Image (cartoon, rainbow, N blue to C red):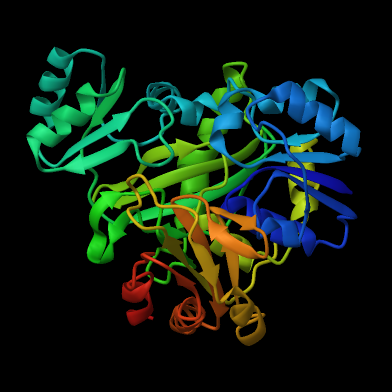
Amino acid sequence: MKVLLIGNGAREHALCRSLSLDPDVTALYCAPGNAGIAEVAELHQVDPLDGAAVAALALELGADLVVVGPEAPLVAGVADAVREAGIPVFGPSGEAARLEGSKAFAKDVMAGAGVPTARSYVCTTPEEVDEALDAFGAPYVVKDDGLAAGKGVVVTADLEEAAAHANSCDRVVIEEFLDGPEVSLFAITDGVTVLPLQPAQDFKRALDGDEGPNTGGMGAYSPLPWADPKLVEEVLQTVLQPTVDELRRRGTPFSGLLYAGLAITSRGVRVIEFNARFGDPETQVVLARLRTPLAGILLAAANGALADLEPLRWSDDAAVTVVIASHNYPGTPRTGDPITGLADVAAEDAPHAYVLHAGTKRDGDAIVSAGGRVLSVTATGKNLSQARDRAYSALGRIHLDGSQHRTDIAAKAAAGE
């Protein structure tokens, strides 16, 4: 099987790593990729948002499967263009990807499907914003209706900050605050059958102790030793399957990766948001634990054949990933700084720990930073404590001037094992 993957982040490096380990994959291409992905896949240049260009590249390479990693190409309809070219593609249509592209559309689908979520208002004027903030009270939850790379949500007790964020968006969703721990649950679906993966938890805030601004995610771990063993089955029955059924009923079947961001509240499970693709950095830990070869699962989803698959196999090991971010992230990041120590991790920590590249590029013989989140240091172990120790030990070998990372990823869960 020849596979072309679209994207250039750590999520795509994690996907490429798993695909490169799949014996059925005879050729692996990535466009545009990054310095780390170049070690496991052949890189090609393409505009990820140009569906015609992506489809043409897939035809030129003779790809048997195209996997679209990021949300922006999905919302732009890139998967549609590839499907129209007759190539199987893992990723929803542009219409179905509105589940992530528009918070208001997602709320409407959830209402139709009877999926439990926070009460909310969609606002387009300052007057509506003031009414909604007043109705819910603090803490305020304000979400940009469109795509914002994981940084369009403000949760604050400060009314002025909430109103300022709301009024900076063309259209905004204001909703009630959901208490309780958050869980990320991915499911692979062909539009009918829904195959949940193992749950993970990510860390959105920039600083230790969940302080600082929201980011695209600073780390993650799996499994969740504190979660109810029946959680995945409950979410499949009350959230994932009803949502897929509702989208099919509307004539916009969802095929690809459905990501449910959940709050385990005192009143039960509630959906915080849906995404239409693998989440970053949770993908790094979920795929570290998946034992079933990945390409066959994604191809079965693309071809509507998930019901024929054997049950997925998982490692009992735990996995932890810690993100190294550049100076000033999530503000305007500093780029172009050299990264050292990557070879040391490969020599000293493999196979239990490894580095997945996000914002990197090659500059001559050096690898330099090229984005806000630069690397995901990922490790496995017999439990979270061991995986965590290995991840932070490997991270200690890496140097990037001015970089930042959280020191408390999975610490609380590990302590409770």
Q: Nearer the viewer, residue 308 or 216?
A: 216
Q: Residue at x 67, y 26 (%)?
A: 78
The reply to whether residue 307 is visible in this rendering is no
Q: Residue at x 88, y 31 (%)?
A: 59
Q: How many marks are shown on the rendered structure?
A: 0
The image shows residue 57, relative to residue 187, as above or below, that is above
Q: Nearer the viewer, residue 413 or 341?
A: 341
Q: Quadrant of the C terminus?
A: bottom left
Estimate the x, y position of residue 348 in percent, counting from the top left. Answer: 62, 87
Residue 40 lies in quadrant? bottom right
The reply to whether residue 43 is visible in this rendering is yes
Estimate the x, y position of residue 89 in percent, counting from the top left. Answer: 75, 35
Does residue 116 appear to the left or right of 50 in the view shown? Answer: left
Q: Residue at x 43, y 82 (%)?
A: 385
Does residue 180 appear to the left or right of 94 in the view shown? Answer: left
Residue 380 lies in quadrant? bottom right
Residue 350 lies in quadrant? bottom right
Estimate the x, y position of residue 353 in percent, counting from the top left. Answer: 59, 77
Q: Residue at x 26, y 49 (%)?
A: 213
The image shows residue 398, relative to residue 244, as above or below, that is below
Does residue 279 appear to the left or right of 203 in the view shown? Answer: right
Does residue 2 appear to the left or right of 180 in the view shown? Answer: right
